Image (cartoon, rainbow, N blue to C red):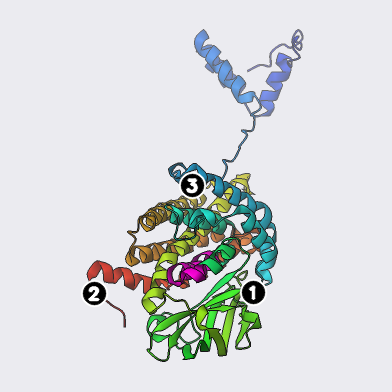
């Protein structure tokens, strides 16, 4: 094709290049002008117009699509819509406290093997967390106290499991021991001070050489001498024991071989009581677990739990608190999921957020599915507990399932964060480690599985 005569071709009034310049530019790009002219010569006007539109759209600079990540939401099935306004408000207040006050200090406390009491005690006191659970009269749980306790535990564990354990040992194990096994005088003395967090409690059952077999093998002994009991033995893994104002100790009465409960008040001032903080843990490092040694520890008869007559009473306390540990797994998994969703939608790789990749979305979906199943299971369990219908097997099933699914979820969270997942500053490493404790305490998952298995088969498989 001959080059067109360009002597009269100039730039248009709109600043567009002259025809000669445009043709030269096309040739420079390797466009066959003869084929282009032939193609357009065979088109009708409508087709030519459509072609022009297509070319113009292709030539326009493309606007980069703005991406606004959705806010993390671990409540996919709207559990929030199934609870009362009072519960919702208390959860919101607690969430603000945990995010604003606890989250900034918890990694340092975790690294330092230290419970940040200077933050937790005044904060929990101001929030008045225990009145919605136990009420003003402290006679029993409120009608929906178990649901409230579970929801609060979930909110605490969503930020930090160590803090949830501190909360559960005091408000669950220690207070529940007094509520179930204490006399009216003992309840009146201790429970109001514990509800207000003026006195912190601990619960001493597990021993150095007896863990899962504790129901048949309590080795700590109690011997009565007049109006005094003499306690001898050791208790291990006892949360809050390094600073507690009272420690509930379970010991076997030498006289009748039955397990009884004792309140060791002001333990640091009791010459027969000593405690060594357990160090070197890789989980729940912000819980101050202790090895308690009792050497002729003297406790007055008035501090023996008057309604604790055998290990069956201990088992009742454990049953009532096992649901709280299941809720810890829910909160931990929920926090891990929400942090992972936020990380995936803001972490940029290969020109965009990693959340656009299928494998990342698959991890998030599996995590969210586990969180949602755990939430609905535990909510129903707490409803049964409030109705007085919860069985040992139901509590154990929740512990087994939530501990296992939490383990899966935090592993996916650590994986999704890549190398950043092992840094405490991203928090999922702490979840990853703390889940190992959830899996083992309040009855190992194996023991709880056998409890459920016995219930569904009618056959006990315990050794």
Along the viewing direction, whichever of 284 and 121 lies nearer the viewer:
121
Disc 2 to disc 3, how far (Cα)?
38 Å
**Residue 396 occupies quadrant:** bottom left
Main SS of the magenta part reads helix
Q: Which residue is mark 2?
A: 459
Distance between the alpha carbons at the discs numbered 1 and 3: 36 Å
- Is residue 186 highlighted in magenta? yes
Rendered location of residue 419, percent (x, y): 62, 61
Residue named by callout 3:
75
Q: Look at the numbered discs 2 and 3 and tell me whether their residues touch, using CB distance below 8 Å.
A: no
Please name the residue shown 64% across and 24% down the image: 59
The residue range painted magenta reads 168-187
Which residue is at a point 45% across and 58% down the rendered structure image?
Answer: 141
Q: Is residue 412 visible?
A: no
Q: For the residue labelled by badge 3, is the local secondary structure a helix, a strand or a loop?
A: loop
Count of marks overlaid on the render: 3
Magenta stretch containing residue 134, yes or no?
Answer: no
Residue 72 in the image: x percent, y percent? 56, 46
- Name the secondary structure under disc 1: loop
Q: Is residue 118 above or below residue 31?
A: below
Dot label at residue 243: 1
Of callouts 2 and 1, which one flags the residue occurring earlier in the amino acid sequence? 1
Visible in this render: residue 65? Answer: yes
Q: Residue at x 60, y 88 (%)?
A: 272
* Pointer 3 local density, CA inside 10 Å: few below 14, some 14–19, many at least 20: some
| Residue 295, placed above or below residue 5 | below
* Residue drawn at 59 percent across, 57 percent down: 159
Q: Judging from the image, what secondary structure is the residue with disc 2 in?
A: loop
């Amino acid at each position: 094709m001959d080059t067109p005569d360009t002597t009269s071709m100039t730039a248009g009034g709109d600043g567009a290049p002259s025809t000669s310049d445009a043709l030269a530019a096309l040739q420079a790009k390797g466009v066959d002008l003869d084929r282009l002219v032939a193609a357009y010569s065979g088109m009708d006007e409508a087709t030519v117009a459509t072609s022009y539109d297509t070319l113009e759209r292709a030539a326009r600079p493309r606007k980069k699509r703005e991406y606004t990540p959705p806010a993390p939401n671990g409540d996919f099935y709207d559990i929030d819509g199934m609870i009362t306004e009072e519960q919702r408000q208390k959860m919101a207040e607690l969430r603000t406290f945990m995010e604003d006050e606890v989250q900034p200090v918890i990694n340092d406390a975790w690294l330092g093997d230290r419970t940040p009491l200077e933050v937790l005690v005044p904060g929990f006191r101001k929030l008045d967390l225990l009145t919605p659970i136990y009420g003003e009269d402290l006679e029993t749980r409120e009608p929906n106290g178990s649901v409230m306790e579970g929801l609060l535990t979930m909110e605490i564990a969503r930020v930090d499991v160590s803090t949830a354990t501190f909360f559960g040992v005091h408000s669950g194990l220690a207070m529940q021991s007094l509520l179930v096994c204490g006399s009216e005088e003992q309840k009146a003395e201790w429970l109001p001070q514990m509800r207000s967090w003026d006195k912190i409690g601990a619960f001493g059952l597990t021993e150095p050489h007896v863990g899962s077999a504790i129901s048949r093998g309590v080795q700590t002994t109690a011997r009565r001498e007049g109006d005094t009991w003499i306690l001898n033995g050791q208790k291990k893994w006892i949360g809050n024991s390094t600073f507690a104002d009272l420690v509930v100790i379970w010991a076997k009465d030498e006289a009748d071989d039955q397990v009884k409960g004792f309140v060791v008040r002001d333990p640091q001032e009791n010459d027969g009581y000593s405690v060594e903080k357990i160090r070197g843990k890789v989980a729940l490092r912000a819980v101050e677990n202790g090895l308690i040694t009792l050497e002729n520890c003297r406790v007055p008869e008035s501090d023996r739990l008057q309604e604790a007559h055998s290990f069956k009473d201990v088992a009742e306390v454990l049953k009532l608190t096992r649901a709280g540990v299941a809720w810890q797994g829910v909160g931990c998994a929920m926090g891990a999921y929400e942090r992972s969703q936020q990380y995936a939608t803001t972490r940029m790789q290969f020109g965009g957020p990693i959340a656009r990749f299928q494998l990342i979305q698959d991890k998030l979906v599996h995590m969210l599915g586990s969180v949602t199943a755990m939430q609905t299971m535990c909510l129903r369990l707490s409803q049964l507990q409030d109705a007085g219908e919860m069985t040992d097997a139901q509590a154990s099933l929740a512990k087994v399932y939530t501990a296992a699914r939490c383990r899966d979820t935090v592993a996916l969270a650590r994986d999704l964060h890549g190398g950043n997942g092992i840094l405490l500053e991203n928090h999922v490493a702490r979840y990853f480690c703390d889940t190992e404790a959830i899996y083992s305490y309040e009855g190992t998952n194996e023991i709880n599985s056998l409890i459920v298995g016995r219930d569904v088969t009618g056959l006990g498989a315990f050794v």
